[in-house]
Amino acid sequence: MLRTLLALALAAAAALPQPAEAHALLLRTSPPKRAVLRDPPKQVELWFNERLEPAYASVSVSMQAGAPVTIGKALVEGTEARHLTVQLPVLPPGRYTVRFRVLSVDGHLAEDSFTFSVGR
């Protein structure tokens, strides 16, 4: 009886969904996370370890007060589709938040945010 219960418990544990690993990992950014820049960047660039689905990739940049500042739509660039960019206007001094959401070609969603600042 104990063996049967143990076998059932092991079978039930094996049938449970396994945690999904995040596949589209952010490798680096420009500007770097938490950077304090003297000159404002002209764009935000994100590099990932996996190819991205261009139709489902988004990046937004907003001021500390929450007002969006990005120009146009985020673009997936490069021959391997791992590079995401969005254009910026001339930014005044302040703190900015970059939020991104991407879908890798293997179907895994990744989203996160980081900040950078433009000095006075």
Image (tube, rainbow, N blue to C red):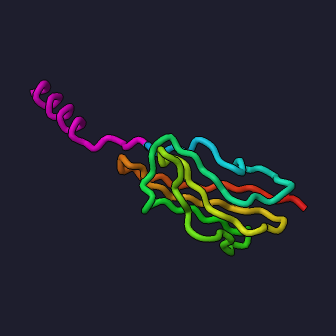
Residue 119 vertical position relative to residue 17 in the rendered view, above or below: below
Q: Residue at x 19, y 38 (%)?
A: 12
Q: Locate the N terminus and report the quarter of the image it occupies.
A: top left
Q: Nearer the viewer, residue 40 or 34?
A: 40
Q: Quadrant of residue 21?
A: top left
Q: Main secondary structure of the magenta part?
A: helix
For this orientation, the residue located farthest to the right is: 120
For this orientation, the residue located farthest to the front is: 79
For this orientation, the residue located farthest to the top is: 3
Q: Is residue 47 left or right of residue 102?
A: right
Q: Nearer the viewer, residue 30 or 66?
A: 30
Q: Which residues are magenta?
A: 1-21
Does 111 lie within the magenta span? no
Q: Residue at x 36, y 46 (%)?
A: 106
Q: Position of residue 69 (x, y in %)?
A: 68, 71
Q: Residue at x 72, y 51 (%)?
A: 31
Q: Quadrant of residue 99?
A: bottom right
Q: Nearer the viewer, residue 70 or 11?
A: 70
Q: Position of residue 11 (x, y in %)?
A: 17, 34
Q: How many marks?
A: 0
Q: Position of residue 39 (x, y in %)?
A: 84, 57
Q: Locate the C terminus and report the quarter of the image it occupies.
A: bottom right
Q: Residue at x 87, y 59 (%)?
A: 119
Q: Position of residue 91 (x, y in %)?
A: 78, 67
Does 18 lie within the magenta span? yes
